[in-house]
Amino acid sequence: MPDKKSKKKSCTPNSSHNMEFKNKEKKNWSQVFFNVTSVVALIGAFISLISLYENKFSPANTKLLVGDYVWIHYFKDRGNIGFQIPVNVSNSGAKFTIIERFTLAVKKPNSKTKYMLAPLNLQRLDSEGNLVADSIATPCPVPGNSTETKGILFYSSYDTPSEFQILEPGTYELTVSAWVGNSKVPAATDSASIVLTENDIKRLNQYLLKHTQHTARVPTTKWAKWGPHYLSEVEQKVLEQKN
């Protein structure tokens, strides 16, 4: 009959081996946990650095968005043309920027050339929802991570008003540009098109002949696609042919 003490002694090596294995397994899991938490911490730090850069140090990023309507009118004194255009200006960068000037390029139907119009003044909405002069066209500061809406009145030359006239129906392409510093390339642009019918042209020419300062509100074609019930049959046909 085997001795109990000898049995205990025979079990001791196996027990020690099991304890060592368990301790080693715990160490392995601890190492895995440490590695995972380290990776998560590094990812969090990296995301924090990106967020800090975007919120504090990222360069200015200017964007323009032309509104849904354009107002066209003649200046009664000299007969030159004006375009009133609402523009949303945004800066998604952290750094402050200044838009030195805005410009408007107009391309007439069946023409490859563009006519450049200068800004006369910045505008605001009055209590009745009309665009009225707010200030002369001066450089426009845009803080970082902000957006502003400006009404801008562009006008053709006072000295040579006959140089640019609206005399024919069709699609007029408009491009608004924002210029920063002395760069030869605009910091941001946005384009829109308007469709003028025979009736629109007649109405505008009547304003010119009578030397009255009235405006004609025209929807841009991108808005027209969303609100076709606002268009006449002629305008719808023109849009269908263009698309």
Image: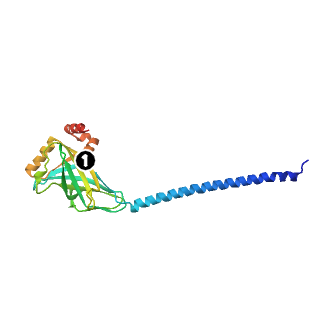
Residue drawn at the location 19% of the way across and 53% of the way down: 116
Q: Percent from the top left, x then y, of residue 115?
A: 18, 51
Q: Percent from the top left, x then y, of residue 149?
A: 28, 56
Q: Within the image, what quadrant is residue 143 found in?
A: bottom left
Q: Nearer the viewer, residue 143 or 68?
A: 143
Q: Percent from the top left, x then y, of residue 34?
A: 60, 57
Please indicate whether residue 14 sits to the left or right of residue 45 in the image. right
Residue drawn at the location 11% of the way across and 53% of the way down: 161
Q: Secondary structure at mark 1?
A: strand
Q: Which residue is mark 1?
A: 192
Q: Percent from the top left, x then y, of residue 68?
A: 26, 48
Is the residue 75 above or below the residue 223 in the image? below
- Residue 203 at least partly seen: yes
**Amino acid on which the number 1 mark rests in the picture:** Ala
Scheme by which the image is coloured: rainbow
Please indicate whether residue 90 sits to the left or right of residue 71 in the image. right
Please indicate whether residue 48 sits to the left or right of residue 3 in the image. left
Q: Nearer the viewer, residue 84 or 92?
A: 92
- Residue 67 at least partly seen: no
Q: Residue furthest left?
A: 209
Is the residue 57 above or below the residue 194 in the image? below
Residue drawn at the location 79% of the way across and 53% of the way down: 13
Q: Residue furthest right?
A: 1
Q: Within the image, what quadrant is residue 76 found in?
A: bottom left
